[in-house]
Image (tube, grey):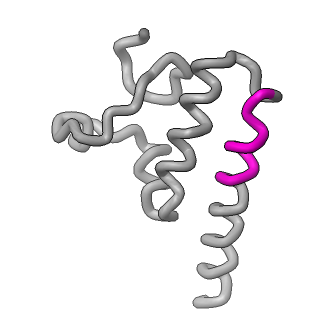
Amino acid sequence: MATHRGHDWSRRVNNNNAEDDEEDDPVDTMIKKTGCLNLHYKVQECMADNRDWRKCQDQVTEFRKCIMEYNKRNTQQH
């Protein structure tokens, strides 16, 4: 398992570590604002487990739908 932060497929998610909150990856910070962070983590975990994005299409589709809904809500508000 890699020790650096960021979009490393081998990174395991620990949602209960206060230290991690202080060192948020900028992408994670942006995604957190959408409400889709847990789905993003599911994609990352699938990629770490499978090393093949084709095997993660269910997770990718869920994440994509969440982001699209966020964008739709944001567009309607502006």
Camera-side residue: 50 or 30? 50
Specify the farthest residue to the bottom: 77
Where residue 4 appears, x then y in whole percent? 37, 18
Where residue 46 appears, x then y in whole percent? 62, 29
Camera-side residue: 71 or 43? 43
**Whether residue 15 is situated above or below residue 35 in the rendered picture:** above
What residue is shown at x 64% (from left), y 25% (from top)?
47
What residue is shown at x 55% (from left), y 45% (from top)?
40
Camera-side residue: 26 or 1? 1
What residue is shown at x 75% (from left), y 20% (from top)?
52
What residue is shown at x 71% (from left), y 66% (from top)?
68
Specify the farthest residue to the top: 1
Is 76 magenta? The answer is no
Specify the quadrant of the image occupied by residue 25.
top left
Side of 10 where 24 appears, left or right:
left
Is 58 magenta? The answer is yes
Position of the N terminus, as image quadrant, is top left
Question: What residue range appears in magenta?
Answer: 55-63
Where residue 22 appears, x then y in whole percent? 21, 41
Q: Main structural element of the magenta stretch: helix, strand or loop?
A: helix
Specify the farthest residue to the right: 54
**Whether residue 73 is situated above or below residue 25 in the rendered picture:** below
Where residue 54 appears, x then y in whole percent? 82, 28
